[in-house]
Amino acid sequence: ERLKQCELAAERYEELNLQKQNLLLEAEAVSLAADTLEQLSDELYEEFGARFAAALSGYATAFTDHSYDTLTADEDLNLRAVTKERSLEISDVSFGTGEQFYLALRFAAADVFDPEKKNTMILDDSFAAFDDQRLESAILALQKCGRQVLVLSSTGREEAAAKRMGITYEAVF
């Protein structure tokens, strides 16, 4: 009886030892996968991060008529604007300026993910919070962005601004 218990304990020990080896292999694989993902993330940031940052600041500068020198986004897409005098959180700027920054964010993302500008961008009442000056700055920037943009509007302000500015557009009703 005692011998049988020892044999069972030895078998159980071997099973547990095998499980331990398998868990160690799995832990090593998970660690390797995490390291690989971190490396890929760094490589993606290097590849796209600089382009995204440049596009984001470029659009923000254009949309705000050069009121802001730089617009940055952290990994959670929290925006921070920089002027010659100070650095501002998105909550520190007016609602209209914040909307300009979010529009810049969408255009910068489009530039990174569609660098050949083959896809049409659709903006649905994206300028509702813009005053006339912001609207005109945005329309000028859209004209220069190099991609087809469909502007859906319930007010017609965009069309009126484009007419005032002498910008060619195609209206679809």
Image (cartoon, rainbow, N blue to C red):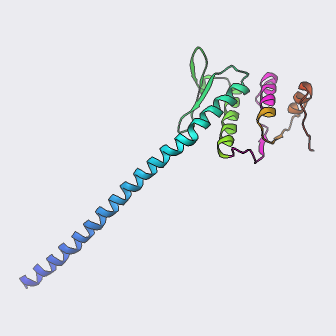
Horizontal side, residue 128 vs residue 48: left or right: right
> In the image as oriented, which residue stretches furthest toward the top?
85
Percent across and percent down for residue 78 are 57, 34
- Magenta span contains residue 58: no
**Which residue is at 69% across, 25% downward?**
61
Q: Looking at the picture, does residue 45 appear above or below residue 99?
A: below
Q: Is residue 37 visible?
A: yes
Q: How many marks?
A: 0
Horizontal side, residue 135 vs residue 115: left or right: right
Q: Is residue 127 visible?
A: no
Q: Nearer the viewer, residue 110 or 130?
A: 110
Percent across and percent down for residue 97 are 69, 25
**Which residue is at 68% across, 28% downward?**
60
Percent across and percent down for residue 140 are 81, 28
- Magenta span contains residue 126: yes
Q: Looking at the picture, does residue 20 appear above or below residue 76?
A: below
Horizontal side, residue 110 vs residue 37: left or right: right
Q: Please report the bounds of the magenta region as a residue range.
A: 114-141
Q: Looking at the picture, does residue 41 appear above or below residue 28?
A: above
**Which residue is at 77% across, 25% downward?**
134
Horizontal side, residue 79 vs residue 96: left or right: left
Residue 9, picture quadrant: bottom left
Q: Nearer the viewer, residue 2 or 24?
A: 24
**Which residue is at 53% across, 45% downward?**
44
Residue 155, picture quadrant: top right
Quadrant containing the N terminus is bottom left
Q: Nearer the viewer, residue 13 or 61?
A: 61
Q: Looking at the picture, does residue 3 appear above or below residue 46?
A: below
Quadrant containing the C terminus is top right
Percent across and percent down for residue 138 are 77, 29
